[in-house]
Amino acid sequence: MIAWVGTVIDAVYVVAVIAFILGLKAMSSPETARRGILYAGVAMLVAVAVTFATGGLGNFALIALGVFIGGGAGWYWARVVKMTDMPQMVAIFNGMGGGAAAAIAAVELLTSLSAGATTGLSLAGAIIGSISIAGSFIAFSKLQGWLPGRPIVLPARQVVNFAVLLVGVGFGGAAVVVAQAFYLLPFFVLLLVYGILLTLPIGGADMPVVISLFNALTGVAVALDGFALVNGPLGDAGYAMVIAGTLVGAAGSLLTLLMARAMNRSLGNVLFGAFGSGPDTGGPVTGSLKPIDVADAAVLMEYSGQVVIAPGYGMAVAQAQQKVKELADALEARGVTVKFAIHPVAGRMPGHMNVLLAEAGVSYDKLFDRDEINPELAHTDVALVIGANDVVNPAARRTGSALQGMPILDVDQAKNVIVIKRGQGKGFAGIENDLFYKDNCRMLYGDAQHVVGELVQAVKKA
């Protein structure tokens, strides 16, 4: 390859990496997230395109075919996916990234073993990538409803899981030490099995953390593969993979820890605690469920000084965000102050509620996180809970409850609470909600979009 061509390729990679960093930074705010995604997407497109000019690269037709199929499928699914299905799409796409990292590592291992060389970096990339794709597929299956959302706890799971991981890594180590590709097959199979076994006992309440964790693992796997490629014919592409993978891994790791902290639990407890599979020993819930009709709920809100709306996954399922925006507008037209209380793990992925409400046109300055809104709830006339459950459950304050210690939205402190809920089912954690039985709480049953639409009409007619 001509020397100046390599210099140009290096320069383009540097520019692409800078754009990727800027895009990642922009994604930290809802106001700039769309621009950040555009920056990162263009940077990745440029990096992929310039790789075709790298010396020593062959099989251009197959590569182009793969890019066309993968890019086309990704574009189509991203266009047609419903917002309610976005978490599982993120999970499966992330798993594809982990699978790609594992495949690259497999090729590097086969190449190095045939040449009599050894590389621990490719082995590490293969381990992490395999766990990521298998775990992401289980997360996708739970979110999609193919598997039960509750924890699936197998007998002696910790011992079995550790044994599978240990033996799998042992096969990988044997392949590197004795330079025999024969050991790679059981190595990959066992690591995939470990990824499945690791994720099965994790319940739906922890899916936001799991998605973020596997995203971080995919980034780490890509970075390790990049290190392995640096000394090969595609060294320039290796540097780009190292930087991009490290950024994704670091950002994903930080988000994972923040999400676990938001539930007041350690990452180890999320991964190995089988949260939601044990009994709730905090004592029986006292009180009764008290229904309210649309007309009374509308009157209660329209004569309030402040209404705080706490959305949850039920709002997403019902696609009620636009009606919620209309309700907020109708109340504000009557002089009511309306704010939105956003719990960091409401929904099934980080920022799920923010994205839905932004899509409906809710102003960002009306969205308040838990720490900002909780001090105001005691002075709030009405807290309107739409499809949220575990994140507003006062059982988190009850000793012995399975939710004990989880930071929640203190909506029960409001003067009045109205809960819009399709039925009397429990949340992801499978725990009875103490809020529903409080003296100041009223239940408004029905599909969220339909019920909120009726509330809008009732407020406007008043």
Image: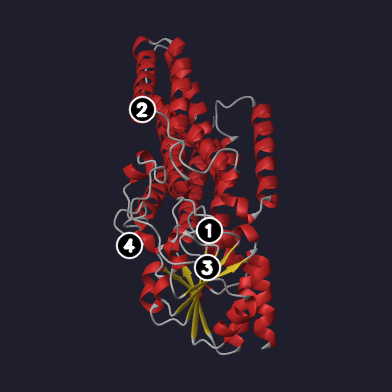
Q: Mark 2 = which residue?
A: 156
Whether residues under marks 2 and 1 lie with C-beta atoms below 8 angstroms apart, the answer is no
| Secondary element at image label 4 | helix
Spot occupied by residue 30 in the image (x, y as percentages of width and height): 51, 65
Q: How many numbered marks, from 0 up?
A: 4
Q: What is the quadrant of the C terminus in the image?
A: bottom right
Give the mark toward the camera: 3 or 1.
1
Q: Earlier in the sequence, mark 2 or mark 1?
A: 2
Give the amino acid type for the residue marked by disc 3 in the picture. Answer: Glu
Q: Which mark is residue 352?
A: 1
Q: In this view, does 247 lie above or below 53?
A: below
Give the amino acid type for the residue marked by disc 4 in the picture. Answer: Arg
Whether residues under marks 3 and 4 lie with C-beta atoms below 8 angstroms apart, the answer is no
Give the mark toward the camera: 4 or 1.
4
Find the distance from the CA under tag 3 to the CA under tag 4.
34 Å
Spot occupied by residue 391 in the image (x, y as percentages of width and height): 44, 61
Find the distance from the CA under tag 3 to the CA under tag 1.
15 Å
Q: Mark 4 = which residue?
A: 397
| Secondary element at image label 1 | helix
Q: Mark 4 packing: few (<14 Cα in 10 Å), some, or many (20+)?
A: some
Q: Which of marks 3 and 1 is nearer the N terminus?
A: 3
Q: Which of marks 4 and 1 is nearer the N terminus?
A: 1
Q: Which of marks 2 and 3 is nearer the N terminus?
A: 3
Give the amino acid type for the residue marked by disc 1 in the picture. Answer: His
Rendered residue at 47%/70% (across/down): 341
Q: Does the image show residue 444?
A: yes
| Residue situated in front as seen by the camera: 246 or 84 | 84
Q: Mark 3 = which residue?
A: 31
Give the amino acid type for the residue marked by disc 2 in the picture. Answer: Ala
Whether residues under marks 4 and 1 lie with C-beta atoms below 8 angstroms apart, the answer is no
Find the distance from the CA under tag 4 to the CA under tag 1.
25 Å
